[in-house]
Structure formats: structure tokens, C-alpha cells
Amino acid sequence: PAAVISLSVWLMSQPQSVMFNEEAVGGVVDRTWLAGQGMVGALVFGVIVGMIYCWFLKKDITIKMPAGVPQGVANAFTALIPAAAIIVGWTAIIYIVDITMHTTVMQWVYAMIQAPLQGLTDNLGGVIAHQFLVTFLWWFGIHGATVVGGVMGGILTANVSDNQAILDSGRELTVANGGHIFTSQLIDQFCTVTGSGLTLGLVVYLCFFAKSEQLRSIGKLGIGPGLFNINEPILFGTPIVLNPMLAVPFILTPVLSGALTYLLIQWGILPMFTGVVVPWTTPPIISGLLVNGWKTMVWQAIVIVGSFFIYFPFIKMYDNQLYKEEQEAAE
């Protein structure tokens, strides 16, 4: 019921007419708000409705059916009072916003929340902060990509949608025309490719250069999933989590990759990302080619090779330590 009420609130909040041949046409859904521009509004309305609905249930402000009534029917009546209160209250908000600001709730959320957030995050500092938080949280064992993605996912998806809209309009995709450099593809293909921390270079060392039996075993276990951007075996098996010897390269590698990629796009060396998004499990190199052509593919390969050299001095020191411990244990 809460999901259905959220959907109703979302539809109510949108413009109730569109302009066609200089005439307002009602009874339609404006497609403008079905893509990136409506993303943050949908998240906000869903959270608000969910909180209010749960408050009614916790306070037991519901219609109670007698014993013997089927549970499905009883649940439908339970939702009536919260639904009525939310719909009536939201209708009042819609009229207040319309009278005082001459706009819709959806347009107000976009102008006051989404647009400033997109502008605030679409810069070099935003890329660096995003990746620092992802790997910093992961180092403590918290799934940083999920935590940060829950906040940033809608904004980055909206950036992708805006870039594609520019191309669809026939204009050149540039920052001057409103294009965004910081998109979900930048994160997926250059920061979390091969897993959070960009760990494929580390895995290559573990498989082919490690002296420690422990690290060689973990490398063999992790190379397959790593090619599909899954690196939990490496994070918890090496381990990287709570390991001070590997904290610096783990945090530094994706930050450098994201920052350099941002600058190369800003300088016009790499093309800006369009609306093409591939599944996050798409292997590296292939994903770079599919997302944005051969230049992006080549740069992605350079980044992955570079990750090996960033990790090398740190993992070699850790490898020597483990190897020494294994030798002492064997003796």
C-alpha cells in the first residue's frame, strides 16, 4: 500500500498539462519527469510517504476488521486511513505551492534540490570525495559502493539522462551546452571497475608474483570474479579490510583514476559520456569500448595497468611479511 500511495503522490506532484501547438492539453503524463529530471523527486516522495505511512501503523491509527476477515482484505482496510490522510495532505501542499510559487511540487523539488545537487557534484572535487568515501567505508568492512550509491545514484543517473537529452536535441554534447562529466559511467568504468578499489592490478600480483602461499591462493580465487567487477574475495581474503598496509593504495587508486578521467574529459582528450550504460558486471576493456568507444577503452586499459604499479610496493611489503611468517611456521 505504501508503494501505491507513493506512486499516486508522485503522479499528483507533476504538471497536469503539457503545451501542444500553443495550447494546454490536460489529462496526460508529462514524459519530462519520467526520466532523470524526476529521479530525485521520486526518491524524496517515496521516503516521505513511507515515513508517514509507518507512523500511522506504529500509532495504530487504522481501521480494524473483526476476527475471521481474510488477512488480504484486512490489510486493504488498514491502509485506508493513512492513504486518505496522505492524499488529502499532499493535495493541500500542491495547492499551496501552486498559489505561492506558481509551480508544481515536482518542478520545485527539481529546482531547489536536484539541480543544485547535480551542479555541486559535477566537478573534480565531487569525483574525489565520492571515491574517497566509497573506499574509506569499504576499508572498515562497510559496502561503500552501496552506501554512497544510495545517495548519489539518482543524481548520477540524472546526469546521464541529461547528456542523452542534449544529443537527442541535435546539439553537441559539451559542458557549455549543459553536459555533465561526472556520470555513473565514470564511476563504473574508472573507479569501481574490477571492484571497489580498482583491484585487478593487485590480483595480477597475487597470481603471478606473490611468494606467500596465502596470497597466491587468494589471487587464484579472486581473478575470475575480478574480471566481472566482483572483488569481495580479495577485500576479505587478502585482506584489504582493516589492513593498514594496503589502505593507502586501496583508497588512492580509484581516486587518481576518477580524477584523471575527469580532467581528460574536461580537456577534450576523452569524449563525454552519452546515455549508453552497460551492466556493472561487464568485463573491463569490453565495457570501456561499449560505453564510449576506443579512446575510452584504451584509457581504461592504461588505468588498470597503472593500478598494478600503485599497489606493487605496498603488496610486496605485505607479501614479504606473510612469506616470512609462513617460513617460520614451517620450520
Image (cartoon, helix red, strand yellow):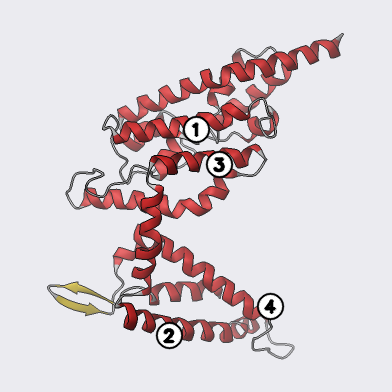
Give residue 214's position: percent from left, percent from top: 73, 20
Q: Disc 2 or 4, which lies upstream in sequence?
A: 4
Indicate which disc residue 134 carries: 3
**From where the camera sits, is residue 282 visible?**
yes
Q: Disc 1 or 3, which lies upstream in sequence?
A: 3
**Label 1, on which residue?**
254
Q: Disc 1 or 2, which lies upstream in sequence?
A: 2
Give residue 128's position: percent from left, percent from top: 47, 38
Residue 66 or residue 226, whichever sits in front: 226
Give residue 116's position: percent from left, percent from top: 37, 57
Q: Disc 4 or 3, which lies upstream in sequence?
A: 4
Distance CA(mark 1)–CA(mark 2): 47 Å
* Left or right: 2 in relation to 171: right
**Amino acid type of the residue tagged 2 in the rendering:** Ala
**Label 4, on which residue?**
58
Please report contact status of discs 2 and 4: CB closer than 8 Å, yes or no.
Answer: no
> Dot 2, crowdedness within 10 Å: few (<14), some or many (≥20)?
few
- 297 relative to 161, above or below: above
Name the quarter where the N terminus is drawn: bottom right
Q: Look at the numbered disc 3 and give the secondary structure of its residue.
A: helix
